[in-house]
Amino acid sequence: MKIRSRKFDGRCGRHKHYSPAVDGQEGIKSGCPRCRLLFDIWEASLKLNQLIRGFNPRHDDSRTPVKAEPIPEADPRQMRLL
């Protein structure tokens, strides 16, 4: 099952400097619905990480997957054709 393959880089159009991790729920200005959605997404991601670590405590997100095959170097004979 593949769950966390998506990177999300969202910002509010009005409050570009709002960061849910830094400002929290108190940093939402005038009840902005987009900032509230950003906070909800951030909170859900924390809960998802907690659930995954509860299922498999040895899971390490910081470890990069090992690539199966290295990318072969360019053949110098083909570079002359360019």
Image (cartoon, grey):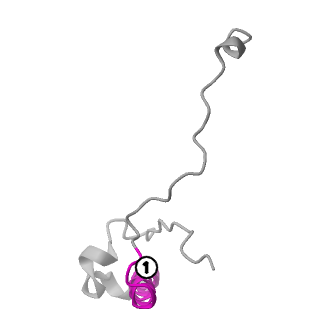
Figure check: 50 above or below 15: below
Magenta residues, as a range?
33-59
Q: Residue at x 74, y 11 (%)?
A: 81
Figure check: 79 above or below 51: above
In the image, 62 versus 31, the foreground residue is 62
Residue ranking furthest to the top = 80
Q: Position of residue 78 (x, y in %)?
A: 71, 15
Q: Main secondary structure of the magenta part?
A: helix
Q: Quadrant of the C terminus?
A: top right
In the image, 15 versus 22, the foreground residue is 22
* Amino acid, disc 1: Leu
Q: Residue at x 31, y 82 (%)?
A: 29
Q: Residue at x 30, y 76 (%)?
A: 21
Q: Residue at x 43, y 79 (%)?
A: 38
Q: Quadrant of residue 64?
A: bottom left
Q: Position of residue 1 (x, y in %)?
A: 63, 80
Figure check: 73 above or below 48: above
Figure check: 13 above or below 74: below
- Say left or right for 50 vs 10: left
Q: Quadrant of residue 54?
A: bottom left
In the image, 21 versus 70, the foreground residue is 70
Identify residue for label 1.
38
Is 53 colored magenta in this rendering?
Answer: yes
Q: Position of residue 24 (x, y in %)?
A: 27, 83
Q: Secondary structure at mark 1?
A: helix
